[in-house]
Amino acid sequence: MSSVWERVRETRRRIEMATARAGRAPGSVKLVAVTKNVDLPAMEEALRAGVAAIGESRVQEARAKRQVIGDRVEWHMIGPLQLNKAKYCPGLFTVVHSVDREDLARELDRRARDHGVWQCCLLQVNVGRESQKGGCAPEKAEELLRALAGFDRLRMAGLMTVPPFDEDPERARPFYRELAALRDELNRKGAGREPLAELSMGMSNDFEVAVEEGATLVRVGSAIFGPRPGPLTEDKET
C-alpha cells in the first residue's frame, strides 16, 4: 500500500473522528485533495484510495490533468482566479471556491451561459483581513451576495476562507467560527437566492478544527501528498 493511499485513509479517519466529536452526521464533510504540483501517478493513487474531489489553484494545470483523469472526480478551483481565466471555468470545474468580486461573477455567469451550464460557486471571505489574500471583507459579504443573486447562471452555494497561517491549529478556530456565524447570519437575512449550505475551510494543518467548527469541504494537500515542489502562492497552507 503506497504512502498516498495510507495518507488518504488516515486523513479520512481524522475527518470522521472530528465529525463525531462535533456531533455531526457521518459523511457530512467532503475531502478535497489539493493536487497543485502533484504528478498524475500520485493523483491516480489518491483516486484509488477513494478521493472523489480534486482541488487545483491554476486553470492551466487543471486543464492538462483533466484531459488525462477526466470526469471520474469533481474538479474544484480553490485558488485566486484572474478575470481572463474565468472563461475556462464553466465545464471544467464543478465548484469555484474563490469568487470574491462582482466583475468575476459576471464573467463566470456569461461564460456559463455560453456553455449552457450552471456554475456552482462559493463566496470567498477574507476573515483575517490580510491584504495579500483574496476575498471580500466580512462586512461586505451581504451586499456582494445580494448582487451576485442577479446572475442566474451562478449557484452561490456557500462561503470559503483562507485564514492567517499559524503552526498552532487552534489559532485558526476563531476565523472558522466567524465564517460559520457569517454564513448563518446571511441565511437568516435571506441574502442569497438560495440558502448557503457549504463552508469551505480547513487545510492540512488545521482541518480537524475546521470540521469541529462546521466545515463541509476541507482542502488537504500536503497531509496526503507530502511537501510539494514549485513556487508557493496564496494556497501554500493546503
Image (spheres, rainbow, N blue to C red):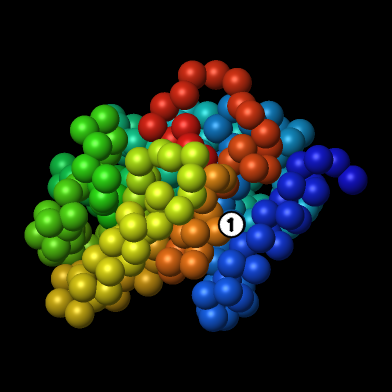
Q: Position of residue 99 (x, y in %)?
A: 28, 48
Residue at x 47%, y 32% (from the top left corner): 236
Q: Secondary structure at mark 1?
A: strand
Tell me if 57 is positioned left or right of 188 in this view: right
Q: Position of residue 195 (x, y in %)?
A: 29, 75
Judging depth in this view, the residue of 50 and 126 nearest the camera is 126
| Residue farthest right in this picture | 1
Residue 145's quadrant in the figure?
Answer: bottom left
Judging depth in this view, the residue of 139 and 198 nearest the camera is 139
Q: Position of residue 115 (x, y in %)?
A: 37, 49
Residue 116's quadrant in the figure?
Answer: bottom left
Q: Position of residue 215 (x, y in %)?
A: 45, 64
How crowded is the residue under tag 1: few (<14 C-alpha within 10 Å), some, or many (20+)? many
Tell me if 225 is positioned left or right of 41 in this view: left
Whether residue 108 is visible to the viewer of this picture, yes or no, is: no
Judging depth in this view, the residue of 69 and 156 nearest the camera is 156
Residue type pointed to by label 1: Leu
Whether residue 60 is visible to the viewer of this picture, yes or no, is: yes
Residue at x 29%, y 61% (from the top left corner): 178
Tell me if 214 is positioned left or right of 8 in this view: left
Residue at x 49%, y 59% (from the top left corner): 209
What residue did someone put label 1 on? 31
Residue at x 45%, y 53% (from the top left corner): 170
